[in-house]
Amino acid sequence: MLSIGVVGAGKVGAVLAARLREAGHEIIAAAGESDASRDRAAALLPGVPLMKPSAVARSCDLLLLTVPDDMLPNVVRVLADSGSLREGQYVVHTSGRHGLAVLAPAAAVGAHVIALHPAMTFTGTSVDLERLDGCVFGLTAGPDERLLAEDLVRELGGRPTWVPEEMRGLYHAGLAHGANHLVTLVSEAMDLLAAAGSADPAGTLRPLLEAALDNALERGDAALTGPIVRGDVQTVKAHLEDIKANRPDTLPSYVAMARATLDRAVTDGRVLPIRALSILRLLDAAVAPTSRHQDH
C-alpha cells in the first residue's frame, strides 16, 4: 500500500482520498487553504493533517493533484522547482483537459506521472463515494505506469478508459458538453415551465428527461422526437414567440439547440430540406438583430 498526499482538498480530492483510504492506503497529509476545504477534510478525512503543498509532496509515495485545470501547470512547476518532488514518486492529477505534458516538470526529476480523470460530477460529500462505483476514469500514462493506474481505478471502484495524450481536450469537451451544458439546459427548461405556471417544474420534467436520456444513450439520434424532427414549422414558430414574450433570456440557447437538432435530423433524412429551410428561417429571424429605421 502507498502513502498518499493530496494537494487540493476540494470536492474531488477529498472524495477520492477517502475512497483510497477505504482501500487500505494511508492518506498521510492534505493541502487545502479555504474553509470549505478544511471542512471537507475534517468530514471525509478525519485525522489527516493539513499541510502546505510542498510539505504534502515531500511526505508521500503518491501525490494526488486535484487542483483546478488552470492552476495545475503552476502547481507542478512550483513543486518541482522547490525540490518537493523526487525520483520514483508517483504524481497523479485528476484534470480531464490535461494529459501528461503538464506533468513534465515532475517527470524531469524522475517521478512516474499519470493523468486520472473521473467522469463524474462531485458534491464533495459522502454521497459521492457511492457514485464512484462503476464510474469511468479517463487514463493517460506511460507503459511503466499503466498497471498502477488501472489498480488505482479499481480501488476507487471505477472502470478505466484509455485516452491518448493528444485527445485529452476533446475527451473533456465531450464530458463538459454533455454534463455541464445539460445542467444549463434543464435549468432553462424548468424556468420555462415555471413561467407557464407549473407548480412543480422538476417533477414535470423528471420522467420525460429520464426516458429521453436513457433512449439517447442507447439509440443516439434515433431517439430524437419532437417538433423539429417532425418538421412542425408552426409549433416551432409558437415556441419562439412564447419564449420571446416570457423568457427571452432562454431564446439564444433554444435557437442554438434547435439548429443543431435540425442539422442532425436533415442529415439522417427525417426532415425534408424544404421544410428544414422554413424552420431555419424562423430560427434565424428569432435572434436577428432588430434594425431601427430613422426618418431623414
Image (tube, rainbow, N blue to C red):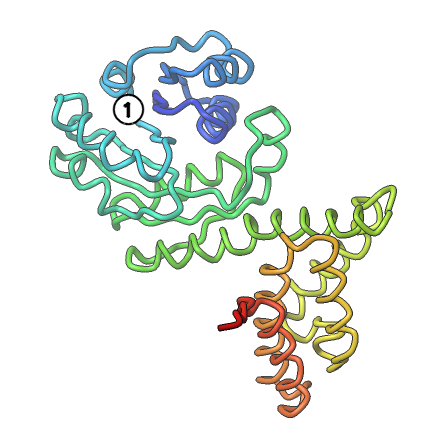
From the viewer's perspective, is 97 left or right of 39? left
Q: Please tell me whether mark 1 sits on a helix, a strand or a loop.
A: loop
Camera-side residue: 207 or 92? 207
Quadrant of the frame with the N terminus: top left
- The vertical placement of 143 against 154, above or below, is below
Residue at left 51%, top 48%? Answer: 136
Callout 1 amino acid: Asp
Badge count = 1
From the viewer's perspective, is 260 left or right of 199? left
Q: Residue furthest front?
A: 296
Camera-side residue: 222 or 84? 222
Residue at left 63%, top 52%? Answer: 249
* Label 1: few (<14), some (14–19) or many (≥20) C-alpha neighbours in 10 Å: many
Q: What residue is disc 1 on?
A: 61
From the viewer's perspective, is 7 left or right of 120? left
Expressed as whole percent of the image width and height from the top left, the position of residue 241 reads 74, 66
User: Residue 70: which quarter of the image?
Assistant: top left
User: Residue 257: which quarter of the image?
Assistant: bottom right
Expressed as whole percent of the image width and height from the top left, the position of residue 141 reads 29, 48
Camera-side residue: 185 or 35? 185
Residue at left 86%, top 47%? Answer: 198
From the viewer's perspective, is 181 left or right of 51? right
User: Residue 68: which quarter of the image?
Assistant: top left
Expressed as whole percent of the image width and height from the top left, the position of residue 161 reads 44, 53
- The vertical placement of 120 against 230, above or below, is above
Camera-side residue: 127 or 277? 277
Expressed as whole percent of the image width and height from the top left, the position of residue 281 reads 61, 80
- The vertical placement of 258 against 96, above or below, is below
Residue at left 25%, top 29%? Answer: 75
